[in-house]
Amino acid sequence: MREEGSPVPKPVLTARGRATRERIVTAAADLMHRRGVAGTSLDDVRAATGTSKSQLYHYFTDKSALVGAVVQWQVGRVLMAQQPELDGIDSMADLCRWRDRVVELNRDAHALGGCPLGRLAAELAEADRCAPIELVDGFAAWQRHLALGLGRMRDRGELDAEPDVLAAGLLAAVQGGLLLAQAARSVQPLEAALDLALSGVAAQLAPSAGPARV
Amino acid sequence: MREEGSPVPKPVLTARGRATRERIVTAAADLMHRRGVAGTSLDDVRAATGTSKSQLYHYFTDKSALVGAVVQWQVGRVLMAQQPELDGIDSMADLCRWRDRVVELNRDAHALGGCPLGRLAAELAEADRCAPIELVDGFAAWQRHLALGLGRMRDRGELDAEPDVLAAGLLAAVQGGLLLAQAARSVQPLEAALDLALSGVAAQLAPSAGPARV
DNA sequence: GTGCGGTTGGACTGCGCGGTCCAGTAGCTG
DNA sequence: CAGCTACTGGACCGCGCAGTCCAACCGCAC
């Protein structure tokens, strides 16, 4: 889904070019996370990166192309931040460890900013226009990672439910929890959301495995 | 929280004035729900309401004041749309009926737009600046309605958990589910989120009551 | 050295935005 | 009727925005 031979001409970049492009994307991602996409002007990005207007338009056709790159970058960053807990899910205890990791990440950020992907999703998905594909793909990838772990649990007979549906519910709990956490400036809603969702997962553990702590 | 003798002079409004003001708020709420706050200009509102610039500034000191009024109006509207299911919660079956109502509302909207409050929250709560008080109050009111119902269940000995925490988790499930539903253009994530959360509530029913359908 | 293409700086443009201002009208009170 | 005030219409302003353009600058190949 990246680096493929796309229909666009794909301008060749030197090492210096790639570095500049990445500087732009990371700074833009940070600004857009803090102030929103609409609240971030290209001049802001220019000032934050010490670049010039022509550079922005050299590497990106327009602002929406930059936003697309930011979305892709944030998807990778969010998934990376949950490693190795996300990919290591193989039991109810692992799931709780992942929960703790997500809460810890939000606590480190002082419950500010919410989820970068959630923020982008809320702002970019308008009623008329569809959410950018990169964003939908990002959520799908996140959900798939969760579903893989839940699938392992099911295959071992520990879990008795559809992994994809559970994963969607867990992801929603994260997003909703982070949204309320940001509004309330407290991690408490995130913890409540995750605990309730995990309790729902635990309720569907196979009887032989017995109940787990939540 | 409304109509109190606030420190601002509170200009007296005639019947006509009130009607115009309400026309502005409702149209602005609709536009901001569809295109976001930043994506809605005062000229858009002006055009949609057939009013003039001076009228907007006659009833609202500036755009942020209009946004505040929109938030308050949406809070009322969202809570109203869930009546009577929201206030009638008194058992696990009632909770499921409320779930069905929320899903139905989103299905009617073709899974577009998400929750008006969620959208406003994501856009207005920036990392630096706090979310508007009206919005935080709105979420708190919503959570309180849920907690009241859960509290009734607990008082009857049907439920064995903290109503406030459960309510926060449920609200997060709604918000996250709606966010993902909007991104995916499908009610499925919302259903998964609510089912998982309700399963978590069911898991905390008092033993004597026995498990309920989820 | 020369040539060339990726790269950079920054002035410039057109426009849409939030916000201001003032003159005019509707509608109520006496 | 007069007079007051809420209300309305619309021209206007300054600014910040996305996007354009062109001249210069590297750094590598030969």
Image (cartoon, coloured by chain):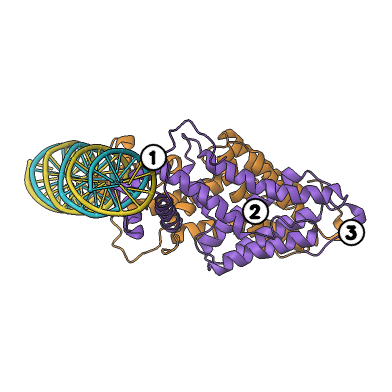
Chain colours: A purple, B orange, C cyan, D yellow
Name the residue: 48% across, 30% down: A7
Quick one: which residue is furthest to the right in this view?
Answer: A208
Residue located beneath label 2 in the image: A173
The amino acid on which the numbered mark 1 sits, given as a three-letter code, is Ala
Could you tell me if residue B95 is visible in this image?
A: no
How far apart marks 2 and 3 lie (CA) works out to 24 Å
How far apart marks 3 and 1 lie (CA) works out to 54 Å
The answer to whether marks 2 and 3 sit on the same chain is yes
The amino acid on which the numbered mark 2 sits, given as a three-letter code, is Ala
Residue located beneath label 3 in the image: A210
The answer to whether marks 3 and 1 sit on the same chain is no
Mark 1 neighbour class, 10 Å CA radius: few under 14, some 14 to 19, many 20 or more? some
Residue A27, image x and y in percent? 41, 57
Mark 3 neighbour class, 10 Å CA radius: few under 14, some 14 to 19, many 20 or more? few
Name the side, left or right, on which A49 lies relative to D15: right
- Tell me the element at label 2: helix
Q: Nearer the viewer, mark 3 or mark 1?
A: 3
Residue located beneath label 1 in the image: B27
Could you tell me if residue B190 is visible in this image?
A: yes
